[in-house]
Image: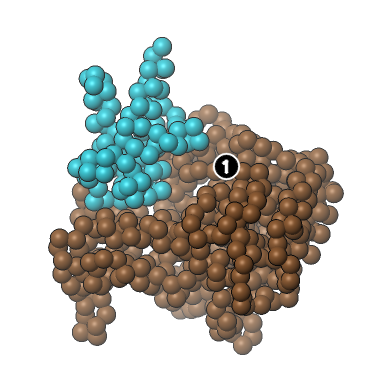
Amino acid sequence: MSESGTRIRQKVARIITESAEGGLSEADLDRAGGSLPALGYSSLSYIRMIDAIENTFGIEIDQDEEDDRLRSVDGIVALVAAQDESAHV
Amino acid sequence: MLIEVIDDAARRHGDRPAVSDRQTTLTYRELIRSSAVWADTLAGLLPGGDRGRIGIRAGNGVAYVVAYLAALRCGAVPFLIDRVSGVQETAAIREDCGLDLLVHDSPAPGWGTPRGELGTLTVTGAPSAGRAALDPQTEVCRFTSGSTGRPHCIEFRGQAVHRAAVNWATGTGLDADDSIACFASLSNGLAFNTSLLSAFLVGARLHLPNGLPSGSAVGRAVAACAATRLVGFPALYDSLVRRPVTDGSFGRLRMAISSAAPLDPGTKHRFVEATGVPLRNYFGAAEAGPLTFATDPLTDLGLGGPLPGVLLRAGTRANPGPVEVRSESMGTRYLNAPGLLESRMTDDGYYRTGDRGYLADGSLFLSGRSHRVINVGGRKIDATEVVEALRAAAGVRDAVVLQVLDRHGVPALAAVLAADDSLDPSGPRRFLADRLAPYKIPSLVRVVPEIPRGSAGKPAMAALEGLFAVDRTDG
């Protein structure tokens, strides 16, 4: 993974854990294979997470278009990377 | 009578936009025509005999509204089920209420065999036997969280639903120029009473975005329908103020309505400052409809005065008392809990809301609840229901469910489980996932060898709350 890819993943993982109500660690994320539904990630956590991703990376997330990618760390990283790339084309 | 009322409104507003979502917009004329087609389909699927019962469990959208009107039009009674009800909860409702058909957008086992389709919605059904009779005048059924571990099905007469809509429209100045962006589920009183029939009566437009109300999604929806009114739960407003509102998408907005769940005063202040739009708390009761409205929320710091057709009783500022209401939009009874709603009525016909409060300068102020209720993000949760489900999970000897503040200072649902310390809390949470709606699954869990209790045997709530104190500082 590229340096910027690694940086995005670290930021995304931190945002996901910090957006939860509490008690969720990055180790928990790893154990769940990066799947947010498997962790029972709440809708309130999702809203906080979307806000933080948008504010941190300066992007806008269309939930209808990105529903699948929003379910996992890998998907969110890909989503951010894709928007980041298109912003720099 | 409801379908006649809606048809009459449609005749007056024919070519105006009635309802929209991201993909579709229907005028009043098209809405009526579409609902007539689906009504024929539903009529062909109903078994005959007494009035048909059709559950609707779907996300907000044009299809939801068309299905609702179609159910009314074919003479059946629509039962509006929360879309996030768990798979087993929904199956229990289907059986409990003797539903003939279930119209939904997410098939699951136990919901009957597929019988047909309404656009993107699926219709399933199964024979029901020995069901309780509906009140002859019941036209719509909705659900409340209940207090005995199962949702109570409230029967509403058409007249009550109609008066709720008329009184809300009149009391809040809703008119044909309004466009409502509604993010609350149509099965919930906040949306049902502020946005559905009331919009159609006056010829307004109802826009129904689906999905989570993140600030960016709300901004897009408000801009898409040039909204004059915004309806949603506190999380929507919390999200909106986390991002700058600078793109002019709120230009036409003149009213924002949140549920009566505690809204962070900081959120309210920032929202008003950013948009210039007053933010009002909706106060209603599932059993009694919409109750109050603050005409000027900048000077009225309470929940406002009673809407037309509503009588309120409460205590005084010095001596708050039970809040009791009498309205034209009262439910008749609980279909699946005979006598219970009646027992909550006073001899002179007032409903005991369970709130405590007082009236001052014509406005209602709440000071608490008569009994402990968990309210997370605007959703009321019956702790008993969650505790019973947790106690059935493998390895759990006992459980207490409570509301605590999470690391963000926001109310969250928490559980303390008595179990061996080897228990992985994710196990009981997964167990609950199939049985209960996601918002009823505790997001914070602690495992202890034994539930701490006081001398009377009651859980020591202060000690239990203390177990979660770390979550407010670890972020």
Q: Residue at x 49, y 75 (%)?
A: B354
Instruction: Give the percent coordinates (x, y) of residue A68.
Output: 42, 36
Query: Is A5 in front, or is B125?
Result: B125
Farthest-out residue, top: A89
Q: Is residue B384 left or right of residue A28?
A: right
Farthest-out residue, bottom: B347
Q: Residues within 10 Å of mark 1 (few under 14, many from 20)?
A: many
- Please identify the quarter of the rendering in which residue B460 is found: bottom left
Provide the letter of the chain coloured brown: B
The chain containing the residue under callout 1 comes to: B
| Chain A, colour shown | cyan
Query: Is B77 in front, or is B195?
Result: B77
Q: Which residue is mark 1?
A: B209
Q: Is residue B38 left or right of residue B251?
A: right
Instruction: Give the percent coordinates (x, y) of residue A65.
Output: 49, 32
Query: Is B261 in front, or is B459?
Result: B459
> What amino acid type is highlighted by mark number 1?
Pro
- Mark 1: which secondary structure? loop
